[in-house]
Image: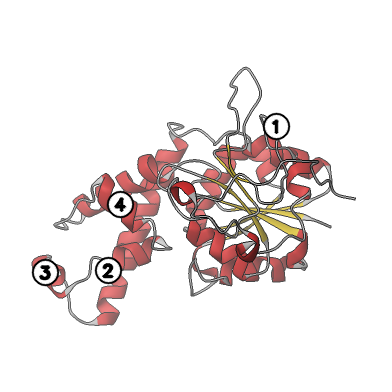
């Protein structure tokens, strides 16, 4: 049985700029830490997988001294855990407030996959409570209940390591070749490919210029019909899937078995870090 495995942040909802960043900064303020991340600084921090791991990037000797933090590594780990729990509380409050909308097409495609009997899952290195709050926002309670969630510290190594996807397919009893991952970042794509999944990418606020060579499809979003129409713009299509104004389940099914397309990508330098749109001609369809 095929499976559709979504990343969370940037895929289900574009949460980094308006959710995680203010939650980090409010946490720093509450704990009296001498740091506030700017948008430009956070654009670099999102390349670090995991919230606690992003917080650990602060812990230079200079910062530890300026903040009056203990130098003992175990004591610092305890502080990070406390900060991160509070950050998760703030973040889930932002999500419950409803100010961040779901990304176009995610509920539509997930509902189509569920009706077709596909397995649904989320594989994310964010805290599980954060992931579940975004999943319910994006899918609604009934469809969200159909998802398996693999998140947070379920694995030690975070993306771009393949561990979270390998863990998900193992727990679900899947053949990786039967699963399509939906990602928004290069690190997420590398994680999925490393675990043997094919990957489709929907670029998000901080990832539009990243190199997605190896992805089977790169689009601006999955798209939605009127009345809230959002038209998909194709940025990379090495298999010649040629989706229409919206990515549909048949498009994703056509990607199964294609794997990592790094070697088959165009030899020309990618424009804006993305793949060539791909060949024209008949669209492959699943048998």
Using the numbered discs, state the Cα–Cα distance from disc 4 to disc 1 in whole angstroms: 34 Å
Q: Residues within 10 Å of mark 3 (few under 14, many from 20)?
A: few
Secondary structure of the residue carrying numbered label 4: helix
**Tags 2 and 4 touching, CB below 8 Å:** no
| Residue 170 visible somewhere in the drawing | yes
Which quarter of the image is occupied by the N terminus?
bottom right
Secondary structure of the residue carrying numbered label 3: loop
Question: Would you name the residue on which mark 4 appears?
Answer: 42
Which residue occupies the extreme right position in the image?
Answer: 287
**Tags 1 and 3 touching, CB below 8 Å:** no
Q: Nearer the viewer, mark 2 or mark 4?
A: 4
| Residue 125 visible somewhere in the drawing | no
Secondary structure of the residue carrying numbered label 2: helix
Q: Tell me which numbered mark, 4 or 1, is placed earlier along the sequence.
A: 4
Image position of 241 (left or right of 1):
left
Image position of 28 (left or right of 190):
left
Q: Nearer the viewer, mark 2 or mark 1?
A: 1
Using the numbered discs, state the Cα–Cα distance from disc 2 to disc 1 in whole angstroms: 49 Å
Using the numbered discs, state the Cα–Cα distance from disc 3 to disc 2 in whole angstroms: 12 Å
**Tags 2 and 1 touching, CB below 8 Å:** no
Q: Residues within 10 Å of mark 2 (few under 14, many from 20)?
A: few
Question: Would you name the residue on which mark 1 appears?
Answer: 244
Question: Would you name the residue on which mark 2 appears?
Answer: 79
Secondary structure of the residue carrying numbered label 1: loop
Q: Tell me which numbered mark, 3 or 2, is placed earlier along the sequence.
A: 3
Question: Would you name the residue on which mark 3 appears?
Answer: 68
């Amino acid at each position: 049985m095929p499976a559709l495995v979504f990343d969370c942040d940037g895929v289900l909802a574009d949460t980094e700029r308006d959710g995680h960043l203010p939650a980090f900064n409010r946490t720093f303020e509450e704990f009296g830490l001498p740091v506030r991340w700017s948008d430009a600084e956070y654009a670099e921090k999102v390349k670090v997988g995991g919230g606690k791991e992003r917080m650990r990037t602060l812990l230079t000797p200079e910062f530890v001294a300026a903040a009056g933090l203990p130098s003992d590594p175990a004591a610092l780990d305890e502080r990070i855990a406390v900060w991160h729990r509070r950050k998760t509380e703030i973040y889930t409050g932002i999500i419950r407030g409803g100010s961040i909308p779901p990304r176009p097409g995610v509920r539509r495609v997930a509902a189509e996959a569920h009706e077709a009997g596909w397995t649904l899952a989320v594989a994310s290195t964010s805290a599980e409570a954060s992931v579940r709050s975004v999943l319910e926002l994006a899918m609604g309670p009934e469809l969200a209940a159909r998802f398996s969630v693999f998140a947070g510290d379920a694995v030690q190594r975070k993306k771009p390591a393949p561990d979270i996807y390998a863990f998900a397919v193992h727990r679900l009893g899947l053949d990786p070749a039967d699963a399509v991952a939906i990602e928004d970042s290069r690190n997420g794509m590398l994680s999925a490919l490393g675990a043997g999944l094919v990957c489709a990418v929907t670029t998000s606020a901080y990832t539009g210029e990243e190199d997605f060579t190896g992805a089977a499809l790169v689009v601006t979003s999955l798209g939605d019909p009127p009345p809230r129409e959002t038209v998909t713009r194709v940025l990379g299509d090495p298999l010649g899937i040629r989706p229409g104004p919206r990515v549909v389940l048949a498009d994703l099914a056509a990607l199964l078995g294609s794997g990592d397309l790094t070697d088959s990508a165009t030899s020309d330098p990618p424009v804006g870090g993305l793949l060539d749109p791909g060949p024209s001609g008949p669209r492959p369809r699943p048998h």
